[in-house]
């Protein structure tokens, strides 16, 4: 029993102490709600389309706007994290997200709904860079594990929140489900403000290094940013993530709609199947993050991405609820790429521009990746959903090549 306890709880016990456990808990819970709500909209797209009389392309545009706004905020969020500290940025992100959800729930017209999606993209976009740098600073020796735990929490939220919404939407309506989540964001915003460390002008960070909050000019930041981005491994990993995100956005934006309209599956059952995507993601993120710390990022990333290609190419050939359940669970393992890639890139960025460089990279890759939902929506309107998923498999194959070219992380 003691051996089993060490195997499963030992890595977690090493993450506590000096307030680090609270940092991990707060960041993980915030990501649970942020990511969970981002996937709530695709789950409710059938009802949103009916409310505003939309086609697939317009519905896909709404999802693209969320991720586009998210992407646009990554670079500013990184700069703000370097200058103001992670506490202020994370708390502000959660509070702004709460306000945008209230706007979405009350939208009388589709143009107002689009404004709400943009606002949610901007608010949630503040979260990513500060989430990454706060974890990297607090857990420099086991960042793969804590990234895995945090992103697994996001996957849990992405499974539970859309599943509950798909079950309850017929009874309470999509507006109540969206607006009713706003108070949870406010509670976590207060938790972030009270538990995360304050930024300091000098002294030490949680990992014992020097503080990176300083008074450098914008020219200094840009110069150091360009220096950081010339790293070959950072560029290769960034290109791989861009292709991965394009496929991921296309898959998650329209998988529930595909199951309902193309496969003839009831929306409640489709919601359960969609939730399995994130169950598979949560389980794989926990295991793969630890595996990358032990065996190295490159072989881990190549193996997971190659498996993701196979599962995407299988989408047009699957039939039946049981087969779909198994495939969607396997499709979720592609989410294990995120913690490994994130920790790999962040660890290779200079500490003095870590937030800014990570934010700039995320802006580029999320803006390009966000167009995946628009692509699949347009293909769906043309009656070529199957071809769209095959194309997403081909895009993911490019990411395999990029990951194979990475150097092992020291």
Image (tube, rainbow, N blue to C red):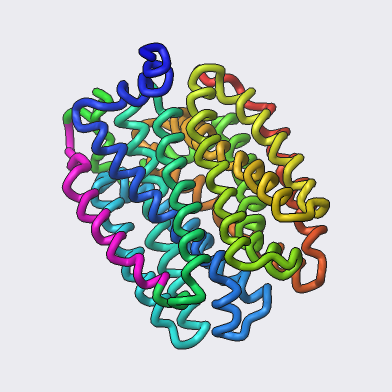
Q: Quadrant of the N terminus?
A: top left
- Total marks in image: 0
Q: Residue at x 48, y 25 (%)?
A: 290
Give left or right: position of 11 versus 45.
left
When the figure is inspected, residue 14 is found, relative to residue 254, above or below; the finding is above
Q: Which sits in the foreground, 355 or 105? A: 105
Q: Is residue 280 visible?
A: yes
Vertical side of 317 occupied by 109: above or below: below
Residue 28, horizontal then vertical, whole percent = 36, 43
Q: Position of residue 167 (x, y in %)?
A: 50, 66
Comparing 359 with 44, the one in front is 44
Residue 86 falls in which quadrant of the image?
top left
The residue under the point 24% across, 29% down is 206
Residue 219 visible in this rendered orientation of the protein: no
Residue depicted at x 65% and y 63%: 254
In the drawing, does residue 209 fall left or right of residue 354? left
Kindly indicate the quadrant of the structure image that contains residue 141.
top left
Describe residue 83's horizontal placement relative to residue 292 as left or right.
Answer: left
Q: Nearer the viewer, residue 166 or 391?
A: 166
- At x 57% / y 61%, what residue is drawn? 271
Position above or below: 344 against 79: above
Magenta span main SS: helix
Residue range corresponding to the magenta coloring: 177-202
Q: Position of residue 164 (x, y in %)?
A: 46, 61
Name the spot of residue 117 as percent of width and height, x first: 47, 70
In this image, 397 relative to 101: left or right? right
Q: Residue furthest top?
A: 3
Q: Is residue 32 magenta?
A: no
Place residue 17 in its image quadrant.
top left
């Amino acid at each position: 029993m003691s051996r089993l306890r060490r195997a499963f709880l030992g890595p977690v016990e090493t993450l506590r102490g000096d307030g680090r456990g609270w940092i991990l808990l707060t960041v993980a819970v915030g990501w649970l709600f942020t990511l969970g709500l981002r996937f709530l909209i695709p789950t409710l797209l059938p009802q949103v389309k009916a409310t505003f009389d939309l086609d697939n392309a317009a519905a896909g545009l709404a999802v693209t706007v969320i991720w586009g706004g998210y992407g646009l905020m990554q670079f500013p969020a990184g700069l703000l994290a370097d200058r103001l500290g992670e506490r202020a940025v994370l708390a502000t992100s959660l509070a702004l997200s709460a306000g945008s959800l209230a706007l979405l729930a009350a939208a009388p017209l589709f143009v107002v709904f689009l404004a709400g999606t943009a606002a949610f993209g901007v608010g949630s976009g503040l979260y990513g860079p500060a989430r990454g740098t706060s974890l990297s600073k607090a857990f420099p020796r086991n960042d793969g594990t804590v990234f895995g735990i945090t992103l697994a929490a996001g996957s849990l939220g992405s499974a539970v929140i859309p599943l509950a919404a798909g079950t309850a939407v017929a009874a309470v309506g999509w507006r109540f489900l969206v607006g009713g989540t706003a108070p949870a964001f406010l509670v976590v915003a207060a938790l972030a403000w009270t538990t995360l460390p304050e930024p300091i002008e000098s002294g030490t960070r949680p990992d014992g290094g020097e503080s990176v909050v300083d008074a450098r000019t914008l020219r200094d930041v840009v110069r150091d940013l360009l220096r950081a981005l010339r790293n070959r491994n950072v560029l290769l990993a960034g290109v791989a993530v861009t292709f991965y995100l394009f496929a991921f956005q296309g898959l998650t934006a329209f998988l529930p709609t595909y199951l309902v309209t193309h496969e003839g599956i009831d929306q409640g059952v489709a919601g359960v199947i969609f939730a399995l995507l994130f169950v598979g993601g949560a389980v794989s993120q926990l295991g793969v993050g630890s595996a990358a710390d032990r065996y190295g990022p490159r072989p881990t990333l190549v193996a997971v991405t190659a498996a993701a290609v196979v599962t995407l190419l299988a989408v047009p050939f699957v039939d039946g609820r049981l087969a779909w359940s198994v495939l969607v669970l396997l499709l979720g393992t592609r989410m294990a790429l995120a913690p490994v890639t994130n920790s790999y890139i962040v660890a290779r960025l200079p500490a003095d521009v870590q937030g800014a460089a990570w934010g700039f990279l995320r802006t580029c890759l999320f803006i390009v990746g966000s167009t995946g939902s628009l692509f699949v929506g347009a293909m769906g309107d043309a009656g070529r959903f199957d071809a769209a998923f095959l194309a997403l498999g081909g895009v993911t194959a490019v990411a395999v090549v990029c990951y194979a070219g990475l150097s092992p992380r020291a």
